[in-house]
Amino acid sequence: MPEFHWHPPGGQTLSLFQEDCLTGLRRRLPESSVDVVVTSPPYNLGLRYGTYDDSRPREEYLAWLEEVALEIRRVLKDTGSFFLNVGGKPTDPWGPLEILLRLRPHFYLQNTIHWIKSIAVSEGDTAPVTFGHYKPIGGQRFLNDCHEYIFHLTKTGQVPLDRLAIGVPYQDKSNIGRWKAATRDRRCRGNTWFIPYETIQSRERERPHPATFPVKLPEMCLKLHGLERVSLVLDPFLGLGTTALACMKLGLSCVGFEIDPHYFQHSVDRLTAFLHSQPLFGRRYGTL
Ligand SMILES: C[S@@+](CC[C@H](N)C(=O)[O-])C[C@H]1O[C@@H](n2cnc3c(N)ncnc32)[C@H](O)[C@@H]1O
């Protein structure tokens, strides 16, 4: 099975495997070796993936995801964070919550983050301004679905976070210095994260996959965990390698698995292109 490895001098590593994640996790990762997992599994919503069947009987799907989560628990350090991105659909809204209940015996739910893909904002009586993109839903029953969950799961519920690493400036600057914690112009942004999809010119060329997340999503999760406390990041469901790309941008090591040969090759090409685009590539990174 194809693999892609990049181990430049300096300690950063990237290891991608075209392999079933359960097999790969068991074969390749020792206990307590991973600091952060950022991943988005298939949601079982009947999406058309290349290899994976996304419409399995619910019980079979939940049992499989629990098995993967137990492997994640095994490889995660006690101080680690597991960011699990899942969404539902209006006709099947319980999916993410059923997954969460299934994982409840194995993890603490330390934070629930809402990934907001689109929002309409108005101040006072002004007309609302809309930001971001979403797939419109027809009919009269359902609202357009503009969010997904990011469940922040940990082994203890006590994992300290670098909240200000993804903080926002105070709107009212007089708060700086007024509160004991407010020593600089940064406050916690809270658990609603507006992250729009990046716009693309060609779906087939740039995003040949039905369910990717924007690179900013794993970047924010990793920064929130605290970059200085990350030695290794894992994504068991690589897709087009977005989590791995975030790691490369942040100078972190990453290991990941993807079963589909087409998506796997696309992620390898995407990461190779990124690494080659870095100004110091030859000197700093060696060759691929
Ligand atoms: C929701 S997508 C992940 C997308 C990814 N976050 C991105 O931004 O590109 C889930 C991926 O899991 C892959 N997958 C499904 N079953 C798998 C398995 N057993 N092992 C590894 N990958 C699997 C699918 O092929 C799909 O690409």
Image (cartoon, helix red, strand yellow):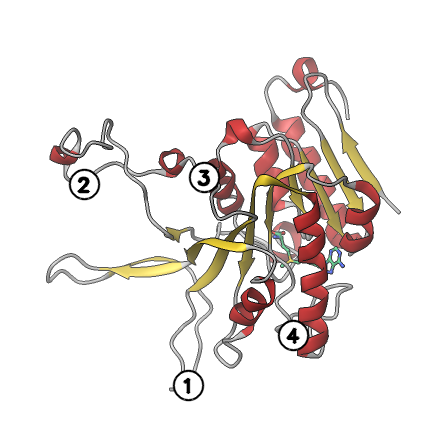
Q: Quickly name the residue at label 3.
A: 224
Residue at 28 percent of width and 33 percent of height: 186
Residue 244 occupies which quadrant of the picture? Answer: top right
Q: CA distance from mark 4 to mark 2?
A: 43 Å
Q: Is residue 238 visible?
A: no
Q: Quickly name the residue at label 4.
A: 46
Q: Quadrant of ligand 1?
A: bottom right
Residue 196: x and y in percent read: 43, 53
Residue at 48 percent of width and 33 percent of height: 226
Foreground: disc 3 or disc 4: 3
Q: Secondary structure at mark 3?
A: helix
Query: Amino acid under label 2?
Result: Gln
Q: CA distance from mark 3 to mark 4?
A: 32 Å
Q: Is residue 62 above or below residue 232?
A: below
Single out the residue that lies furthest toward the right: 1
Q: Secondary structure at mark 1?
A: loop
Query: Counting residues from the N terminus, which is met first, the one under dot 1 or under dot 4?
Result: 4
Foreground: disc 3 or disc 1: 3
**Left/right of residue 258 with respect to residue 189 in the rendered view:** right
Q: CA distance from mark 3 to mark 2?
A: 21 Å
Q: Is residue 48 above or below residue 174?
A: below
Query: Amino acid under label 3?
Result: Leu
Quadrant where the C terminus sits is top right
Query: Amino acid under label 4?
Result: Gly
Q: Quickly name the residue at label 1.
A: 139
Q: Quickly name the residue at label 2.
A: 171
Q: Is residue 97 above or below residue 190?
A: below
**Left/right of residue 216 with respect to residue 283 in the rendered view:** left
Foreground: disc 3 or disc 2: 3
